[in-house]
Image: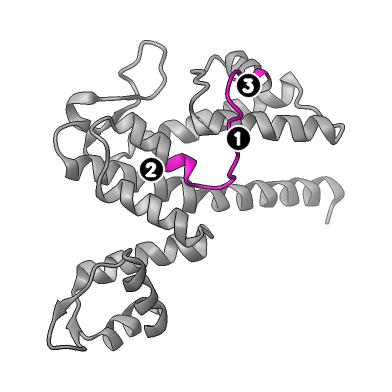
């Protein structure tokens, strides 16, 4: 298809498509002369992925490049690649190095796996510090309620990972772990797993937030008789 058709089918303006081509996040089409090229469904799917990351996940172009690079060229160690991918998603928080005492206490209270190098660990540390400063520190009761709701959600997400790269039942503790034999089977399998994890995180977190707010609204309406 020509670039005009690619723009029509994707909903992305031609000027934006050309920008993505210049940035190297959308592969060039098959040349049909000095100024023309043909594009196919792979370009269309790639463009839809970029659009999702840019518009729905609100990622800046630099972070989109990072995410797409990890999808295209995942490390042999899938667990490391997934960590890098998560660190490319907001909120962007620097680790600061060392321990993360608030996050560690919360994670260990829930009986989950603590890893000081995982990006979400220091994201949690920063978030817990913020609620403390606001005068509404996280209580054990709230933590237990949130953990009980979120862990089954995570188990459902992990169970849907393509190619069996992540096994939700392979750990004696019940925590999701990487099935190395499946993950290392091929770059394509690793790429599919990273794509699933990134999109599932970036695009479904707004859904989770909206549902939580709607639950608040429903409970308030019922209690107040609205």
**Label 1 residue SS:** helix
Mark 3 burial class by Cα count in 10 Å: few <14, some 14-19, many 20+: many
Cα–Cα gap, marks 3 and 2: 24 Å
Q: Percent position (x, y) of residue 78? A: 29, 33
Front one among 173 and 129: 129
**Label 3 residue SS:** loop
Q: Which disc is residue 123 wearing?
A: 1
Counting residues from the N terminus, which is met first, the one under dot 3 or under dot 1?
3
Task: Indicate left or right for 153 with 37 as reference.
Answer: right
Is residue 48 placed above or below 182 in the rendered structure? below
Cα–Cα gap, marks 3 and 1: 10 Å
Mark 2 burial class by Cα count in 10 Å: few <14, some 14-19, many 20+: some
Q: Which disc is residue 197 wearing?
A: 2
**Label 2 residue SS:** helix
Q: Which disc is residue 100 wearing?
A: 3
Task: Indicate left or right for 151 with 83 as reference.
Answer: right
Q: Percent position (x, y) of residue 138? A: 75, 26
Q: Percent position (x, y) of residue 134? A: 85, 36
Counting residues from the N terminus, which is met first, the one under dot 3 or under dot 2?
3
């Amino acid at each position: 298809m020509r670039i005009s058709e690619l723009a029509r089918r994707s909903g992305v303006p031609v000027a934006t498509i050309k920008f993505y081509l210049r940035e190297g996040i959308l592969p060039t089409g098959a040349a049909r002369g000095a100024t023309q090229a043909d594009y196919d469904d792979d370009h269309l799917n790639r463009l839809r992925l970029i659009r999702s990351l840019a518009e729905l996940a609100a990622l800046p172009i630099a972070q989109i490049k990072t995410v797409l690079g990890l999808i295209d060229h995942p490390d042999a160690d899938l667990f490391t690649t997934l960590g890098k991918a998560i660190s490319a998603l907001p909120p962007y928080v620097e680790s600061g190095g060392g321990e993360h005492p608030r996050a560690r206490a919360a994670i260990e209270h829930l009986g989950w796996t603590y890893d000081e190098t995982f990006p979400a660990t220091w994201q949690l540390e920063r978030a817990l510090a913020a609620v403390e400063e606001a005068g509404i520190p996280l209580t054990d009761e709230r933590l237990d309620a949130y953990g009980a709701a979120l862990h089954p959600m995570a188990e459902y997400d992990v169970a849907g990972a393509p190619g069996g790269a992540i096994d939700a039942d392979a750990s004696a503790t019940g925590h999701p772990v990487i099935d190395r034999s499946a993950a290392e089977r091929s770059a394509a399998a690793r790429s599919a797993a990273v794509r699933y994890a990134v999109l599932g995180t970036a695009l479904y977190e707004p859904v989770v937030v909206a549902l939580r707010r709607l639950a608040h609204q429903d409970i308030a309406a019922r209690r107040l008789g609205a």
